[in-house]
Image: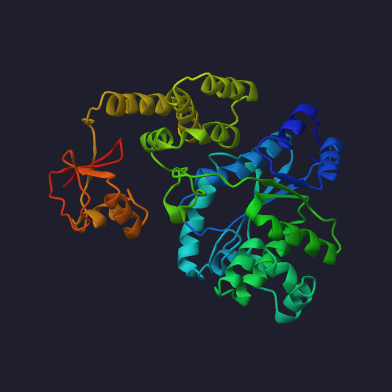
C-alpha cells in the first residue's frame, strides 16, 4: 500500500501536539497531505534495561503516524549502543560491553509493543550495516562534516571550556545515526531536542548518498519525578514495565507543575479534557485529584483498566487512609544492610541512589525513619520507601 487516506485533523494534531520543532514543516505537511505512504524512523540505543515515559514521547508520535497509515521503522542501536551518544550528557559516555547491550535490546521490542503496533513496524539492528563499513567509506562520510560544527554544540562546547575530555569516538556517532537513515531510506525521523545535531546529520548523509533528505520532528525533553530531566541514571523515571501500583504511586509523588505536560506528552487524552484539567488547577482544585486521573490513564495504557482501578484503590488505602497494606512483596536480600536491600530490590537504581534516598529520610523500617546508611534490616521487618512501596524482608 503506497497511497493512504488523508485526515487533515489528525495531521494537524500530529504536527502540533508535544512538538518542539519540525524541519522542514511545510515540506512534511505537504508530504502528509499528498497521500504518499512515508517511512518514519526512530532509533533507540539499548543502553539501559527499561524504557521510561520520556521514551514514550517519540513512540507515541510513531503511533500517530501509524494511525495515519505510514510505515514505522525502528532502529535498535545494538552497534551505536556500544559506542555511546553523549548528545544529552555533560561528560563522555563510556563504551558499554556488547553482552549488556544485547541483553537490554531483547526487552525493547516487548516494551515498545505497549505503544505501537509492533507487528506492522519494521525493526532493524544497525550492527548489520555499521559493522561492514571500512575506513575508506567512513572517511568519505566524515568529509561531509566539519569539526567546528560538532564542537559548537552547547554540551560539547561546555565540556571543552571546562577541560573535560571529548573523545574522537563521540565525533563519529552522528555519522552512524545519519547512515541509519540512508540504509532504511527514511522520509521522517523523530527524536528529542537533544538529538537535533544527529537528526540533521541524517539529512546531510542522505544528500551525500543521493537520497532526498528526511524531515525531522522533535519533541521536548521531559522532567522526571524530581524535576530533573527524566533519565535512568538519575533514578527519577516511570518505566513501562513498572508494576501498576508503582506507576500510580510515582505519578502521585511528582511535582504539580508537570501534570499538564505529562497529560500532553505521555497520553492521548483529548485536548479539550486536558484544557478542562488545566482550568480546574487554575481555579484551585486539589492537584492530587488531577494527578489521580493522570495516574489512572497511564496505568491503563501500560497495563489495563482493571489494573488502573486496583492501583487507585491501593493508593487510597495506603496513602489517604495511612494503612500498611496486608499484601506486601516478600524480598530475600543477599545482604541486609539498608543500601544493599534498596539496590538489590530495585527500590533504588544504584547503591549511590540508595544512599541518597536513605540520607534524605525516604525510607522507614517498621514505621521508623532510617537515615543511617549502615543500618541493618532484620528478617521479619517491613521496609517502606516513600509513601506506598513496601517490602517484607525475609
What x and y, as percent, mark residue 57?
A: 60, 42
In this view of the protein, can residue 318 be seen by the observer? yes
Residue at left offset 48%, top offset 44%: 227
Q: From the viewer's perspective, is 72 left or right of 165?
A: right
Q: Out of 238 and 212, give the one closest to the viewer.
A: 238
Q: Does residue 182 lie above or below 95 as drawn?
A: above
Colouring used for the render: rainbow
Q: Does residue 336 lie above or below 390 as drawn?
A: below
Q: How many marks?
A: 0
Quadrant containing the N terminus is top right
Residue at left offset 52%, top offset 44%: 223
Residue 134, quarter of the rendered image: bottom right
What x and y, as percent, mark residue 96?
A: 49, 68
Q: Does residue 76 lie above or below 369 as drawn?
A: below
Q: Out of 133 and 326, give the one closest to the viewer.
A: 326
What x and y, as percent, mark residue 241?
A: 44, 43
In this view of the protein, can residue 345 be seen by the observer? no
Q: From the viewer's perspective, is 269 left or right of 97?
A: right
Q: Residue furthest bottom?
A: 136
Residue at left offset 50%, top offset 63%: 101
Q: Out of 148 and 11, give the one closest to the viewer.
A: 148
Q: Does residue 378 lie above or below 32 as drawn?
A: below
Residue 275, quarter of the rendered image: top right
What x and y, as percent, mark residue 67?
A: 69, 34
Q: From the viewer's perspective, is 186 left or right of 298?
A: right
Amino acid at each position: 500500500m503506497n497511497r493512504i487516506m488523508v485526515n487533515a485533523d489528525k495531521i494537524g494534531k500530529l504536527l502540533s501536539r508535544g512538538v518542539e520543532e519540525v524541519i522542514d514543516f511545510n515540506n512534511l505537511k505537504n508530504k502528509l497531505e499528498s497521500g504518499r505512504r512515508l517511512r518514519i524512523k526512530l532509533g533507540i540505543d539499548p543502553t539501559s534495561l527499561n524504557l521510561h515515559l520520556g521514551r514514550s514521547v517519540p513512540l507515541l508520535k510513531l503511533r500517530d503516524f501509524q494511525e495515519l497509515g505510514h510505515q514505522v521503522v525502528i532502529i535498535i542501536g545494538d552497534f551505536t549502543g556500544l559506542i555511546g551518544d553523549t548528545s544529552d550528557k555533560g561528560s563522555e559516555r563510556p563504551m558499554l560491553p556488547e553482552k549488556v547491550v544485547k541483553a537490554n535490546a531483547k526487552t525493547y521490542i516487548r516494551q515498545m509493543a505497549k505503544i505501537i503496533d509492533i507487528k506492522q513496524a519494521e525493526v532493524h539492528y544497525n550492527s548489520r550495516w555499521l559493522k561492514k563499513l571500512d575506513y575508506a567509506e567512513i572517511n568519505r562520510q566524515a568529509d561531509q562534516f566539519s569539526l567546528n560544527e560538532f564542537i559548537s554544540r552547547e554540551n560539547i562546547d561546555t565540556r571543552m571550556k571546562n577541560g573535560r575530555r571529548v573523545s574522537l569516538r563521540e565525533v563519529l556517532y552522528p555519522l552512524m545515526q545519519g547512515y541509519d537513515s540512508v540504509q532504511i531510506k527514511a522520509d521522517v525521523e523523530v527524536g528529542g531536542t537533544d538529538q537535533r545535531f544527529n537528526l540533521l546529520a541524517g539529512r546531510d548523509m542522505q544528500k551525500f548518498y543521493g537520497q532526498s533528505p528526511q524531515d525531522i520532528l522533535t519533541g521536548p525533553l521531559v522532567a522526571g519525578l524530581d524535576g530533573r530531566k527524566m533519565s535512568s541514571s538519575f533514578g527519577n523515571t516511570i518505566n513501562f514495565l513498572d508494576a501498576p501500583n508503582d506507576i500510580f504511586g510515582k505519578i502521585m509523588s511528582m511535582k504539580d507543575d508537570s501534570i499538564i505536560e505529562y497529560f500532553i506528552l505521555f497520553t492521548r487524552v483529548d485536548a479539550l479534557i486536558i484544557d478542562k484539567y488545566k482550568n480546574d488547577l487554575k481555579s484551585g482544585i486539589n492537584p492530587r485529584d488531577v494527578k489521580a486521573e493522570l495516574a489512572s490513564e497511564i496505568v491503563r495504557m501500560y497495563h489495563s483498566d482493571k489494573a488502573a482501578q486496583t492501583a487507585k484503590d491501593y493508593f487510597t488505602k495506603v496513602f489517604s487512609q495511612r494503612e500498611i497494606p496486608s499484601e506486601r512483596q516478600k524480598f530475600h536480600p543477599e545482604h541486609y544492610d539498608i543500601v544493599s536491600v534498596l539496590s538489590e530490590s530495585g527500590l533504588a537504581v544504584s547503591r549511590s541512589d540508595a544512599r541518597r534516598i536513605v540520607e534524605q529520610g525516604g525510607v522507614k523500617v517498621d514505621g521508623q525513619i532510617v537515615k543511617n546508611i549502615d543500618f541493618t534490616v532484620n528478617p521479619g521487618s517491613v521496609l517502606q520507601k516513600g509513601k506506598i512501596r513496601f517490602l517484607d524482608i525475609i
